[in-house]
Image (cartoon, grey):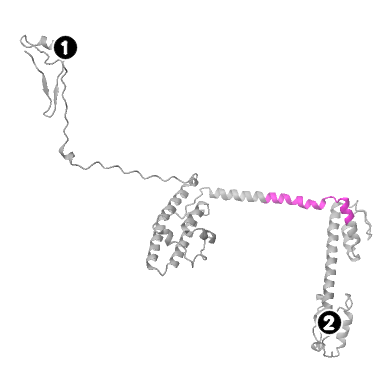
């Protein structure tokens, strides 16, 4: 008698119990003598398991395709090492750039281009979008804090209000943009971009102080040129210049060299080789000034002489006879004769007038001549 062993697990699935030879022998030893377990087929018994889909999933929608994550913008390289306030303000400027029609609403009109209070005209010629100009100034470090940036932004918005004051729709849009800017920068007026701004200012002050000290230290070296020893050619030139001096200038030479041991009384005989270098330099400077004064006086006299000749020629054409002058005027004219060139009038300023114009007296400013 054979026994087929089947075990039903559930109505949908079936499973068979497979026994090895040793297990079959063990079971046969335990069963009564009339029962015996035998193999039906030597081939292994296999069952095909079928899976059934649930009916509610057959007509369901397909699984949604996951959306791609937005690509994160790469942080600009100039933000590396900047403070948190600087980075935050940069993000606010980018948000302002993304605001709808911000570049058109804040664009400066032709009537306000030349009157922009803070933006340079050169920047305006490069870009018609003042927001880009503010961003460029921000990146290059023109603003020390949010307060300076907001000041420029407020002035640009004020210009936009003036430009579009006649257009009601655009005026309202600019007003909304102004509210957006105030909301973005609210409470950030005291935010400083550089955390070490005080230390930076101290470093600049120390650097300027050091530069001043270095400049002051170089001044004595410049003054030391007065003590530089004169060469033989310079002394020879000094002697030649000294011989060209007029006698009235020799008193100044005496005052300069009086401190020397070789000079006694009012004598002007001295040896340049024995004079100190400082005295020689002072003497050289004094002689150059005297020669310059002499040359200027000579040129002035020549100019006055030419002018006198011209005025004398013009006086010849006067036809009125001169009235007799008073004795006081004659005495004043005789006592103030000029030592200038012959034929030159004593007072050229009066050459254009007729003597009848001075019947009430003549007033002369001697210091002018």
Q: Earlier in the sequence, mark 2 or mark 1?
A: 1
Compared across the picture, whether 247 is left or right of 224 comes to right
Residue 315 on image: x %, y %: 83, 84
The answer to whether residue 209 shows anywhere in this view is yes
Give the quadrant of the C terminus: bottom right
Mark 2 Cα shell of 10 Å, populated few (<14), some (14-19), many (≥20): few
The answer to whether residue 259 shows anywhere in this view is no
Label 2 element class = helix
Mark 1 Cα shell of 10 Å, populated few (<14), some (14-19), many (≥20): few
Question: What residue is rendered at 11% in x and 22% in y?
Answer: 7
Q: Nearer the viewer, residue 362 or 264?
A: 362
User: Which contiguous range is marked in magenta?
Assistant: 212-237
Find out whether residue 216 is within the magenta segment: yes
Compared across the picture, whether 265 is left or right of 77 comes to right
Q: Which mark is residue 313?
A: 2
Q: Residue 172 carries which label?
A: none
Residue 83 on image: x %, y %: 48, 47
The picture quadrant where one finds residue 299 is bottom right
Residue 80 on image: x %, y %: 49, 44
Residue 287 on image: x %, y %: 86, 60
Give the quadrant of the N terminus: top left
On screen, 311 above or below 202? below
Residue holding disc 1? 21
Find out whether residue 47 is within the magenta segment: no
Residue at the outermost left position: 34
Label 1 element class = helix
Q: Which of 4 and 320 is in front in this view?
A: 4
On screen, 7 above or below 143? above
Q: Which of 295 and 242 is in front in this view?
A: 295
Q: Disc 2 versus disc 1: distance between alpha carbons? A: 161 Å
The picture quadrant where one finds residue 59 is top left
Question: What residue is rendered at 65% in x and 48% in y?
Answer: 210
């Amino acid at each position: 008698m054979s026994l087929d062993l089947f075990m039903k697990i559930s109505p949908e699935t079936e499973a068979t119990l497979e026994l090895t030879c040793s297990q079959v022998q063990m079971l046969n030893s335990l069963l009564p003598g009339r029962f015996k377990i035998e193999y039906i087929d030597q081939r292994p018994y296999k069952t095909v398991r079928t899976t059934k889909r649930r009916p509610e999933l057959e007509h369901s929608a397909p699984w949604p395709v996951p959306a791609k994550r937005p690509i994160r913008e790469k942080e600009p390289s100039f933000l590396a090492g900047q403070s948190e306030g600087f980075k935050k303000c940069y993000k606010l400027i980018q948000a302002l750039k993304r605001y709808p029609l911000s570049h058109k609403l804040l664009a400066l009109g032709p009537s306000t281009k030349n009157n922009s209070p803070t933006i340079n005209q050169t920047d305006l010629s490069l870009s018609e979008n003042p927001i880009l100009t503010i961003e460029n100034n921000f990146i290059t470090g023109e603003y020390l804090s949010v307060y300076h940036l907001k000041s420029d932004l407020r002035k640009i918005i004020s210009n936009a209000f003036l430009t579009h004051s006649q257009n009601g729709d655009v005026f309202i849009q600019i007003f909304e943009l102004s509210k957006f800017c105030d909301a973005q920068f609210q409470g950030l007026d005291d935010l400083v971009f550089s955390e070490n701004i005080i230390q930076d200012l101290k470093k600049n002050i120390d650097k300027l102080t050091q530069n001043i000290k270095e400049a002051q230290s170089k001044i004595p070296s410049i003054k030391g040129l007065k003590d530089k020893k004169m060469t033989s050619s310079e002394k020879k030139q000094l002697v030649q210049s000294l011989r060209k001096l007029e006698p009235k200038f020799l008193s100044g030479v005496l005052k300069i060299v009086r401190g020397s041991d070789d000079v006694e009384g009012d004598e002007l005989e001295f040896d340049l080789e024995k004079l100190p270098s400082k005295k020689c330099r002072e003497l050289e400077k004094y002689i150059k000034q005297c020669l310059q004064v002499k040359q200027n006086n000579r040129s002035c006299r020549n100019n006055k002489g030419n002018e006198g000749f011209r005025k004398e020629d013009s006086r010849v054409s006067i036809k009125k006879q001169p009235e007799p002058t008073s004795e006081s005027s004659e005495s004043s004219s005789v006592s103030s004769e000029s030592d200038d060139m012959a034929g030159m009038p004593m007072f050229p300023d009066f050459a254009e007038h007729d003597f009848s114009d001075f019947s009430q007296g003549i007033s002369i400013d001697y210091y002018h001549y």
